[in-house]
Image (cartoon, rainbow, N blue to C red):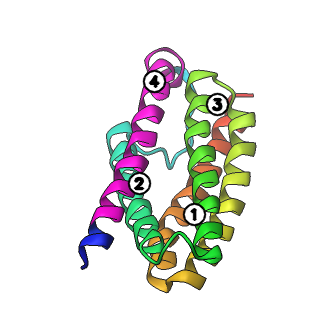
């Protein structure tokens, strides 16, 4: 691993984890008073495991973004890929705010659906720049699919 790749991946992981931390802050309000009272589907995951999986996803996302970034931001494909990445990261963080802090599971579900589509575009652009980076985002796409199903069930069971 080159030092440029290491530095850029480390920075990208840090940025992703900051978004994750902001999500955690938004989550704390809903976890404390709203979420425990919700009816949950049978495939509910405990909060500790849920948080651990998100941390792993943020690390994979950051490494993938660092790999793409290390190809040079001057290249239009790299820029396009990283713009998509930034947009999906924003949508990701916005979900925590919508779902937990604002307690709006239906709007959060819509956010997740848009997020999933943007992740697919991000994977496509990452694959053009570096296939490994695209493959590192695939567990994240699967996790967001799970989150869509879970969020839908929360909305359905509590509407």
How packed mark 3 is, by other alpha carbons closer than 10 Å (few <14, some 14-19, many 20 or more), is: some
Which range of residues does the magenta coloring cover?
Answer: 7-36
Label 4 vs 3, first from the N-terminus: 4
Check the image and report above or below for 95 versus 122. above
For the view shown, which residue lies furthest in the top direction? Answer: 33
Q: How crowded is mark 4: few (under 14 residues within 10 Å), some or many (20 or more)?
A: some
Q: Mark 4 points at which residue?
A: 31
| Cβ atoms under marks 2 and 1 closer than 8 Å | no
Residue beneath label 1, please? 82
Residue that badge 3 annotates: 98
Distance of mark 3 from mark 1, alpha carbons? 24 Å
Any magenta on residue 6? no
User: Alpha carbon of mark 4 to alpha carbon of mark 2: how far?
Assistant: 21 Å
Which comes before the other along the chain, label 3 or label 1?
Answer: 1
Q: Which of marks 4 and 2 is nearer the N terminus?
A: 4
Q: Which of 42 and 11 is in front in this view?
A: 11
Closer to viewer: mark 1 or mark 4: 1
Q: Distance between the residues labelled 1 and 4?
A: 32 Å
Q: Are marks 4 and 3 in contact (CB under 8 Å)?
A: no
Whole-angstrom CA distance, mark 2 to mark 1, is 15 Å
Dot 2: what SS? helix
Residue 40 screen position, x and y as percent: 55, 36
How far apart marks 4 and 3 lie (CA) works out to 13 Å
Q: Judging from the image, what secondary structure is the residue with disc 3 in? A: helix
Between 18 and 153, the one lying in front of the other is 18
Q: How far apart are marks 3 and 2 (CA)?
A: 19 Å
């Amino acid at each position: 691993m080159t030092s440029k790749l290491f530095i850029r991946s480390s920075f990208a992981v840090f940025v992703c984890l900051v978004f994750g931390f902001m999500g955690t802050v938004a989550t704390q309000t809903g976890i404390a008073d709203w979420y425990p009272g919700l009816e949950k589907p049978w495939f509910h995951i405990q909060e500790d495991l849920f948080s651990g999986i998100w941390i792993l996803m943020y690390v994979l996302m950051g490494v993938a973004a660092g790999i793409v970034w290390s190809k040079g931001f001057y290249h239009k494909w790299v820029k396009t890929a990283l713009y998509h990445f930034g947009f999906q990261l924003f949508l990701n963080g916005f979900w925590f705010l919508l779902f937990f802090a604002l307690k709006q599971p239906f709007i959060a579900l819509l956010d997740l659906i848009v997020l999933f589509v943007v992740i697919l575009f991000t994977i496509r652009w990452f694959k053009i720049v570096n296939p490994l980076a695209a493959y590192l985002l695939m567990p994240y796409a699967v996790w967001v699919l799970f989150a869509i199903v879970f969020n839908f069930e929360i909305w359905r069971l509590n509407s």
